[in-house]
Amino acid sequence: MKNQLRNEYDIVGQPTPKKDGALKALGRAEYADDISMPGMLHGKLLRSPHPHAKIVRIDASRAAALPGVRAVVTGKDFPGVKYGNLPQTRDYLPLAVDTVRYIGEEVAAVAAIDEDTAEEALDLIAVEYAPLPAVFDPEDAMRSGAPLLHDKAPGNISAQVAFEFGTVDEAFSRADYVRDDTFETQPVKQGMLEPHACVGLWDDSGKISLWACKMSPYVVWRQLAMGLGVELGNVRVVQTFVGGGFSGGKQEAMPMDFCAVMLSKRTGRPVKLVHTMDEVLTIGHMRHPMKIWLRTGTDKEGRLLAQHCKMIANGGAYSSIGGFSMYLAGAMLNIPYRIPNLRYEAKRVYTNNGFCGALRGHTNTQICFARDSQLELIATDLGVDLIDIRHRNALQPGEKTANGFRIGTFAFDECIDRVVELSGWREKHGKLPKYRGIGFGCGSHISGARLMGHSASAAQIRVQEDGTVQLTTGSTDVGQGADTVLSMIAAEVLGVTVDDVRFARVDSDSTPVDPGTFGSRVTFFTGNAVKRAAEDARRQLAEIAGKRMNVDPDDLVFRRREIISRLDDRQRMSLKEAVRWGAFQTGQLVISHGSYAAGDEKIDFRTGHGNLSPAYNPSACAVEVEVDPETGQVKVVGFWGADDSGFPLNPLAVKGQVIGATVMSFGPALYETLIRIDGKVMNPSFRDYKMPLTTDIPKLDNFQHSNVVTWEPEGPFGAKEAGQGAGTGVIAALANAIYDATGVRMNSLPMSPDRIFFALKQNKEKERAAKQSSAAAE
Amino acid sequence: MKHLLPIALRINGERHDLLVPPWRTLLEVLREHLGLTGAKRSCQEGQCGTCTVLIDGKAVNSCLYLAVEAQGMEIQTIEGLAKGGVLDQIQKSFVQKGGVQCGFCTPGFVLATKSLLNDNPNPSEDEIRVAMVGHLCRCTGYVQIIEAIQDAASQLKHVGGS
């Protein structure tokens, strides 16, 4: 059935180059920092040098008097309204007013004729601080007597989530085997190459415009209105090309955005702000460092009976999306393995560090590292095959998880088998030469989330008189290929080419409101909305053409820019003729609308119960490593992955997504970490914050990814998520490979050379001691 | 304004006479004085490669190169690569092979490829990796970029041989 359906498609399923690829390759795509406007000023932000302090006094008079400086603003220039995602997480101000809570927090902003002058002016702003005791470790921060960051958060608890499904105690009591382990993960940055940048304009009519590289421009739109205390209708957010997102600051309004428009109000000029990479790596928005305690009970064959997870996340100074992160980490314990009984307790703790939120693989990456590392420990103890234990616990299509996820298509078993085959697992595992090893890891992800706030997507289509299609959505292309895949969906339905579809970037004055790009939702949610909008446009066109051709509209098919009678293919007219005839002779314009909301079911966040996503994507991978025992350095020499992304609509882009997600996990597994001493980031530079390079990936012959193709009935043309899931199992696979290569089990990230070196040394010492004691006993 | 120095730069075959402070980098002069924004501003310390331009055919980080020092040399930016609106083969290969995602690193990679293929029209996979090691890409995981460079090399060889 699947094949028959697929053969009908002209567009979807074909590898299709990115629509904006040529513009970008030509260097003509305009990113936010490329914008220049007449009279534009340049802004800079003054940041706190203290991790925690009262602001006693700010004197900006010398800065304001510097030639070339046009305005200085401080926190008092804003209405003092805290902004954030949810009522209980609104804890952030455009600029600090009386307290700073981490090194790098924004305190004042300057607009000047050029960046050098603005920078110089920062040095002339005198801020008197009264330093307060600071706390950096979440466990310290929870102790009584610890410095408090926010009045409303006793014990520095930023968010707390607990849920329980099934009969956990009973299940542990009948388990044949129980073990618990603790895993720790580190702060990781998004690492996009484009620093945050924006241009703000507050014009004389009171209209506030912001051009910025945002993944979720409508989130920014609402937060700007909130923090500025203005009506939403006065705010316009225009999305520029986005030079990489991966969540974080491009997901929300940032202090720079508020300051750009406020400085513009003061000066009557457009004001541009661009972060330096030092700022990007110092300020908030990063992956939560977590301490994950995981207890698992199984039967003799390694069937998972119960899990109990306690997690403490170092949230940093503010909330961002962190409250949701705490739910999500626990929810992700429910896939891709069957855990019939689950207890989860998570705390997100405020500390005087840069704050944390979402980053590609949002919390799932950390959880998968812990779970799939522990799964191998269990299998080894029980003498169960490492692949069998995964099959034995793999969720199957049609199952319902303990927390209420309804699993539809889910080719997890096939993914595992494919990786075993591609990687040559059976010939390699435990059989490679010393210091060479192979590890397995699995993961899973959602295809968009049903949230309490804005969940649904909408799309609008106008078919023009030249037969081209104007497609507007509120979703953003951030490089992942939304522009192309959404255009492909519209083109497929309307029988035109991908080039015939014009994809607009978001402009809150004209595009449909949308939650934005996160949670692997765009192809699925917006894709469905586009499909429905295109179907509506096709219906309108068929009505016009049917009238003109005197054919029943139901008998018309759309192919190659033509509308053809399926009964007699000599009866046909071009798409543009139909549009023109409709517009010119009857005034009927082809303007359509489509939406998708994934049903009205919602998660009950108090109990954690509910079906978060309309579809789930399992993945598996094997990775082969070589460890240098002299240095502890790990070289990734082979990678084989498989995932079930449903029917890949654009295989070229899906390949880019899964490989991109995979390599993005190599870094945090092996070297990426933000080094912080007393809240100060010690490596805020790409020189010292190490991300994977061309030389860090396996040779192409040993780097394969395969899609196990399924047909997701709820997805547009059978598609599911592709951009995050494939990366989630990679870190555990690397930990397991390092174990296979060296016998060293790394429970802490990153698994950097120094740590591996010392672990190897410890192992050797242990072996030597064991030998000596056994010799002594003899 | 004091500190301004008259300089002449040859960029994409055209001469530009400018007055700039001597400490301005080539990247700043290209972007701010000439509106050539294809070279991107990212790390500004020679680690990421997004600001790459060609100077006498060699890829350099324009964020580490003073504009005054580029006088008398042939500077090529990404804007000068396509001729008459037709994409260069390297650009075509990047687009066709999925080497472009967010596109922020793309101009740098394309020009670095130009420089590599000038010196070595038939690079091995390892030679490609080493030549591109100064260029970060967070989106693609590099596989499709390496494939694009291989494709460009083989297409250009085909054209050259025919």
Image (tube, rainbow, N blue to C red):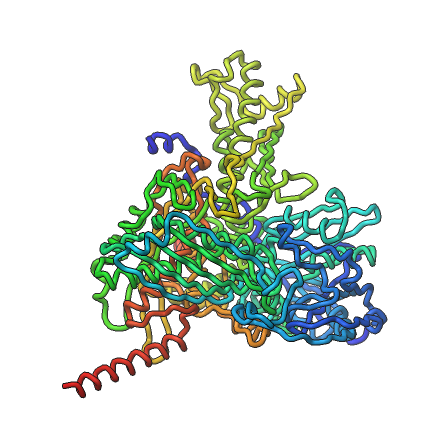
Residue nearest the viewer, comparing A141 with A690: A141
Residue A408 in the image: x percent, y percent?
38, 39
Single out the residue that lies furthest toward the left.
Answer: A778
Residue occupying the point 32% across, 63% down: A179
Residue A144 in the image: x percent, y percent?
58, 70
Residue A212 in the image: x percent, y percent?
66, 53
Residue A671 in the image: x percent, y percent?
44, 70
Compared across the picture, whether A550 is left or right of A50 comes to left
Residue occupying the point 79% across, 71% down: A58
- In which image quadrant can residue A507 be found? top right
Residue nearest the viewer, comparing A440 with A270: A440
Residue nearest the viewer, comparing A174 with B161: A174
Q: Can residue B43 be seen here?
A: no
Label total for image: 0
Single out the residue that lies furthest toward the bottom.
Answer: A776
Q: Quadrant of the N terminus of chain B?
A: bottom right
Residue occupying the point 47% across, 42% down: A610
Residue occupying the point 51% across, 25% down: A562
Compared across the picture, whether A672 is left or right of A639 comes to right
Compared across the picture, whether A222 is left or right of A570 comes to right
Q: Can residue A68 be seen here?
A: yes
